[in-house]
Amino acid sequence: MPVPFDRILYVEDEPDIRAIAQMALEAVGGFTVIACASGSEALAAAPGAAADLLLLDVMMPGMDGPSTLQALRQLSATTSTPVIFMTAKVQPAEVAQYKALGALGVIAKPFDPMELPAQIRQICDSPSQAAD
């Protein structure tokens, strides 16, 4: 059964990618996006974000996506919030590693901004089949 959600805490260090994804998620997907440029920024935003979903870049300076997820799991606001990783590192072993960390799925970069909201909905609606 799909879980309704509309607030996404999105962490991406590249400003252009962050802006494009945020625009697509808000304009096309109708989501409310709390965009952060780093893992530490996400940790500061998370308690007040009331996020229904975490969307994390994997490769970031400082705290990478998996480290950010580990830190977010220590906060009561995000201890069980579903997570999706976005990355260019999508070899089967890498995807398996992200899923072992608790990810519902992985969205490959580069991504099609117009398809991003649908990809997220598809992963959240059927996480067992999300392995693109």
Image: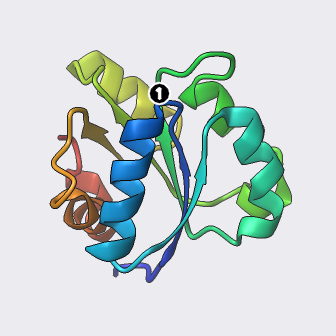
- The residue where tag 1 is placed is 58
Residue in the picture at 39% in, 72% down: 26
Left-right relation of 45 to 101: right
Is residue 5 visible in the rendered image? The answer is yes
Tell me which residue sits at (15%, 48%) in the image.
112
The image quadrant where one finds the N terminus is bottom left
Q: Is residue 132 above or below residue 97?
A: below
Quadrant location, the C terminus:
top left
Q: Nearer the viewer, residue 54 or 111?
A: 111
User: Is the image coloured rainbow, by chain, by secondary structure, or in one colour?
Assistant: rainbow
* Residue in the image at 27% along x and 54% along y: 128
Residue 12 at x, y percent in the picture? 50, 38
Return the residue nearer the eye: 46 or 92: 46
In x, y percent, where is residue 104?
Answer: 40, 51
- Where residue 21 appears, as percent x and y from the top left, is 35, 52
Residue 104 visible at all: no
Quarter of the image where one finds residue 66? top right
